[in-house]
Image (cartoon, rainbow, N blue to C red):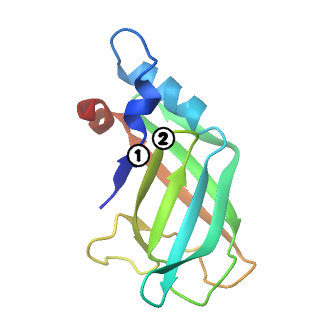
Amino acid sequence: MRQIHGLEKLVEQQPGRLNAQILAELLLTDLHQCRCSIYGTIGDDDRVLLAELALLPGGIEYEMFDQRIDLVVAGPILRNDCVPLTYRLQGEQFALSGRCSMIARVCGVDLYLQRSYTGVVGDIARQKFAIPLKPLLQML
């Protein structure tokens, strides 16, 4: 299940009424140098960093009609000694985390890694994210 982190901290300094446009501007600023870390586990709970993906130049935009932030991250696969299980997309304050999988239609997963995640060390993995603003506004 996708978890939201740092939303309250992101908007706490914003005076007045918060709407989708203002939240989008805050998120665009916060996520301008975001990173996505993909993790697996070895043993009981030893978390292993498998890939570190960075925001591509021009890879973030606000889709005003659908009220969502779209972004694309990419980076090298660092290890392949375990399967990807979790991810964390981290901005300066705002973050998303949850379960991921390379296999489509796995129950309990909120991020399916795209085909560019080959599991081969050195290959460049590319991942798209869509962050809908309406549910975030309802959380506040």
* Amino acid on which the number 1 mark rests in the picture: His
Which of the two discs, 1 and 2, labels the residue nearer the N terminus?
Answer: 1
13 relative to 105, above or below:
above
Left or right: residue 10 compared with residue 34: left
| Within-10-Å neighbours for mark 1: few <14, some 14–19, many 20+ | some
* Residue at the image position 52 percent from the left and 54 percent from the top: 89
* Label number found at residue 5: 1
Q: Which residue is mark 2?
A: 94
Q: Position of residue 131 (x, y in %)?
A: 42, 44
32 relative to 82, above or below:
above
* Label number found at residue 31: none
* Residue at the image position 55 percent from the left and 69 percent from the top: 38
Q: Position of residue 136 (x, y in %)?
A: 32, 36
* Image quadrant where residue 53 sits: bottom right
* Image quadrant where residue 15 sits: top left
**Figure quadrant of the C terminus:** top left
At mark 2, the secondary structure is loop
* Residue at the image position 42 percent from the left and 57 percent from the top: 97
Question: Disc 1, disc 2: CB below 8 Å?
Answer: yes
**Figure quadrant of the N terminus:** bottom left
In the depicted view, which residue is nearer to us: 66 or 137?
A: 137
* Residue at the image position 29 percent from the left and 33 percent from the top: 134
Number of on-image labels:
2
136 relative to 105, above or below:
above
Q: Position of residue 20 (x, y in %)?
A: 37, 24
In the depicted view, which residue is nearer to us: 39 or 112?
A: 39
58 relative to 35, above or below:
above
* Amino acid on which the number 2 mark rests in the picture: Phe
Q: Is residue 82 visible?
A: yes
